[in-house]
Amino acid sequence: MEKKNVNLIITNVRPYGEGDPTDITVENGMITAIGKAGKKDGFDVVDGNGGVLLPGLVDMHVHLREPGREHTETIETGSRAAARGGFTAVMAMANTQPVDDEPIIAESIYLKGREYGLVDVHPIGSITKGLEGKTLTEFGLMKNSMAHVTMFSDDGKCVANSQIMRRALEYAAGTDVLLAQHCEDPLLTEGACAHEGPVAGKLGLRGWPRAAEESIVARDMLLTRDYGGRLHLCHLSTTASADLVKWGKEQGINVTAEVTPHHLLLTDDLLVNYDGIFKVNPPLREKHDTESLRQALLDGTIDVVATDHAPHAAEDKCVEFQNARPGMLGLETSLAIIAEIFVRSGLADWRFVAKVMSERPAEIVRLADQGRPIAVGEPANLTVVDPDRTWVSRGDNLASKASNNPYEGMEFHTRVTHTFLRGALTHSLEEAKESSK
């Protein structure tokens, strides 16, 4: 259970990686002072060791698997992984078993997240009942529930029927909720398991064409233009998808978009050994796609980084590539990847990381107490990052129950050392190391 009325001093940190180290004073979960604090009775002290201080990260796209597939992940283990990754809020996708299409299911997910108190868990409702693409979920009932569901998605499946998606947008506009679309024309991807390109051709794998994603991106932006609502596009993976979103925004269409760390870093060249760990939906693409997606994130065409954290059991991955379940772990490695690509390379600074991994996602999903500035009077949802901590990613050392880690053995140079949820310490790297011994 989350600690209440936390009085804390975080010493020796640099907000947004700027200036000299300073102290952050927290009282009752709120930042009350920034500056050298000295000793205060009744205050816990955490030494940030000169690390970068960021607002707590917000992930718009995770799969926590509970209810229904608790052998791969639970709300508790997923929350612990999120806290280790620097997150203070996550949005949990609806493709659970049963599907999150009723208030009672959403409320159970929300209350379990509150019980564990490691990260704010906000359930996402499904757009259609049972993810079947036929009947709309009752957005209004879900929004008015205790869980206050304000985001809906059939992720894992596309709302392929254009008329159903039109009605969903109209209903969403009337209830002021966000629709997040998994862009995939199922007729173009039937039996597909890898990006349609030279690698898939060489390996004899059925290809997943870029057009399957891009056609839905275009269709749904046009529907949003004509029928209103707020559209969010999940895990973009192609150059043209980014170009289309740029066009849509120039037309004034109310659209936002996300990209995953794996689509920014990995390519389909990794498929040469038929390792199911690298099967994901949408699939890993080619180098020019990753480069275009990086640029689109830098220039604001793509709004946010979202992990699409998707745990799977070993038996779901250790099979023929075409039969493997798609999905990868992402919560504990995402910040390190973004830092590697953008900060350590000099392409961007820590303010950029705060924007795409905290501020903008919180703004899009309207989490009033997340993604806030590091300033007096703001909630103490905070993350401390060591920008010079070398570590090697190992699935067995991650907090998730699953170990389908596509970055196995990869060396990173940035690591989250502390995470605070309303001033409560939810992750300490040193304590995590001790508990794993």
Image (cartoon, rainbow, N blue to C red):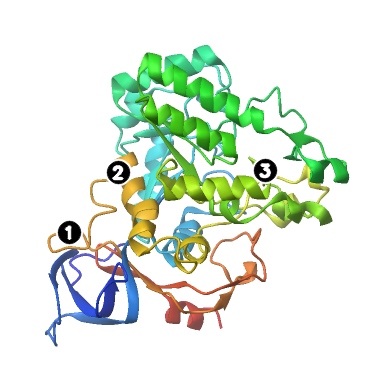
Q: Amino acid at mark 1?
A: Glu
Locate the C terminus by quadrant.
bottom right
| Residue in the picture at 41% in, 60% down | 348
For discs 3 and 1, the disc positioned in front in the rendered view: 3
The label shown at residue 283 is 3
Contact (Cβ within 8 Å) of mark 1 with mark 2:
no
Q: Secondary structure at mark 1?
A: loop
The answer to which quarter of the image holds residue 41 is bottom left
Report if residue 153 is visible in the image: no
The label shown at residue 378 is 1
Q: Amino acid at mark 3?
A: Pro
Distance between the alpha carbons at the discs numbered 1 and 2:
15 Å
Q: Residue at label 2?
A: 363
Distance between the alpha carbons at the discs numbered 3 and 1:
39 Å
The answer to which quarter of the image holds residue 384 is bottom left
Locate the N terminus by quadrant.
bottom left
